[in-house]
Image (cartoon, rainbow, N blue to C red):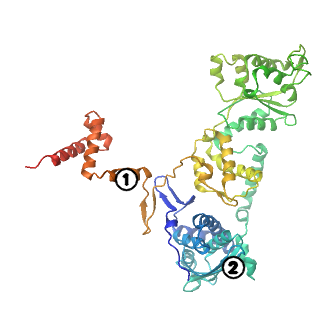
Amino acid sequence: MIKYPENLDLRRLVHFSADNGTIWLGENRMLLLHAAALSSLRKELINSVGREHTRRIFTRMGYASGTRDAELAKKIRGGQNPIDAFVVGPQLHMLEGSVQVTPLKVEMDIPTGKFNGDFRWDNSWEAEAHVKEFGPQQDPVCWMLLGYASGYTSAFMGRFVLFQEVECTACGSAHCMITGKPVEEWPDAAEHTRYFEDDAIVSRLLELTTQVDMLRSSLEQQRQIESMIGSSPAFQRAYDLVTKAAATSVTVLLTGETGVGKERFARALHQTSSRANGPFVAVNCAALPHDLVESELFGVEKGAYTGAHATRIGKFERAEGGTLFLDEIGELPLAAQAKILRVLQEGEIEHLGGDKTRKVNVRIVAATNVELQVAVKNGKFRADLFYRLNVYPIVIPPLRERTLDIPPMVSAMMEKFSALHNKRTAGITDKAMKALSAYQWPGNVRELENMIERGIILAPQDGWIELDHLFPSLNVTDDMDSSISDSGGLEEKRPPEQARLCDAFLATGLSLDEVETMLLTEAVERSSGNLAGAARMLGLTRPQLTYRLKRNQDANLPKE
């Protein structure tokens, strides 16, 4: 029988935060559920979809939980001997309240993939719940626990290790007993591996509803192009305006903070319009030197200026029949603004240095992250051009107003950068995703994209993207206020500043009365003798402060 190492390192990973309603195991969010609730779910599923499908659901739930805990085991005890690292799984299974695990035999060699293990289970919640609802059984019923053991060991060993329950208390045995070994070593593996496979359970239950949902989804996908991800109300308002504008030839003005994705919205407008087969030409007006703006936009005739050795067409002619996206249009000089106004009104341009007008068939989509109305008042932007552009304004919401869109955006970005950097990851931890949703995103979508790329690069191969991979230089607090004590109860997790303050007080050698006197005196002095103000500063009422001051004064009077 294998002796467990101390589990203090695991208990320290469990944190309870009653104020914000979260429980954490490392960076994975946990739930403290009534066993009776899971028992009711089990009963409802068995009665609804049958024993086989219910077993598959619970087995896959356990498998997913086990794989998560295996990643944690490698991180916490990766440098220890393999057995001490491996038994993190059984120890966590007990810490999570699922079952008491006694390792009877563990033979393992990770490089060769060898594994053979026997474990005894006591106090299985699944066996107790099943017998309570359905009475004694002929076959083992610890499906979720078995899925956990298989998922944990498979992830830990890097190969599929299948566990089977050879004894179960639901069948009258004194203990539950499980045995695990590589799947190919089980002659009856096929009878058990089917419970680990994906199954279209929902389609079996609600086939008609699913078909309707799929139809709606396909219609929605026709409306949205690949690069546009979002279902939040703020995103949908902006996207609906784009969809309506796409059916017309109206000039569109996109406004919003830097990094919100104005060019993506412009491309979406182009690709869903009748001009989709034409070119989409994007111009960053802020990057154009002022003395070259007109030649870049409208073209130049040979000999128009020194160095103009040939006639060259500009961006407007390159976008013929399509869309010209003028990003940061507020940075254009006034002379160029006047010519753009003429294009909007007359649909024609002139090359720099030429006197011949040319008709152009171009749709203009402009974008800016500055207040053009303010620029108009300051004389930096033409009022007539502003009113011509502002016919159809679309405000692109900042990322902090569309937090519902962050998870699907993160998934798409992870897929993109995993392929780009040839890096596989297991996913992103719950705590990291919570931090992404709570972050204010001053750089918006562009900042999120850069952060996910950094996370892909820093995360270990096949590992999880964790909080410090995304915010390596920021002091991100975890807002957790309690953990598990050595006795298994809740204990307060004191903020580090409190610990530093206590260290400073204790280092002075002052008594508690002397510390109190010092604080009272300091508060009175800082409030210029105003006792009410001093009391507020100390979190006391004025009578309480007066009493404490008098008590300290009396204590310091010389005794007769």
Q: Image height check: is 245 above or below 122?
A: above
Label 2, residues with CA under 10 Å away: few <14, some 14-19, many ≥20: many
| Distance (Cα) linking label 1 and label 2 | 52 Å
The answer to whether any part of residue 529 appears in the image is: yes
Residue drawn at 43 percent across, 63 percent down: 490
Q: Compared with residue 68, is residue 369 higher up or lower down, i.e. above or below?
A: above
Please state the horizontal and vertical placement of residue 416, each as a whole percent of the image: 75, 50
Residue type, label 1: Asp
Residue in the picture at 77% in, 38% down: 268
- Whether pointer 1 and pointer 2 mark residues with C-beta atoms closer than 8 Å, the reply is no
Q: Which mark is residue 181?
A: 2
**Label 1's element?**
helix
Which image quarter: residue 50? bottom right
Kindly identify the amino acid type of the residue bearing the numbered disc 2.
Answer: Lys
Horizontal and vertical percent position of residue 530: 26, 34
* Residue extending farthest front: 508
- The spot of residue 334 in percent (x, y) is 73, 17
> Relative to residue 354, is residue 153 depicted above or below?
below
Spot occupied by residue 526 in the image (x, y as percentages of width and height): 30, 36
Which residue carries the number 1 mark? Answer: 503
Locate the N terminus by quadrant: bottom right
The structure residue drawn at horizontal position 82% and vertical position 24%, both measured from the top left corner, is 296
Residue drawn where x is 91% and y is 21% of the image: 309
Graded by Cα atoms within 10 Å as few (under 14), some (14 to 19) or many (20 or more), the crowding at tag 1 reads few
Name the outermost residue toward the left: 560
The numbered mark, 1 or 2, whose residue comes first in the sequence reads 2
User: Considering the numbered disc 2 on the image, is that residue within a helix, a strand or a loop?
Assistant: strand
Q: Nearer the viewer, residue 163 or 84?
A: 84
Left or right, residue 323 beside residue 378: right
Would residue 414 appear left or right of 5 to someone viewing this image? right
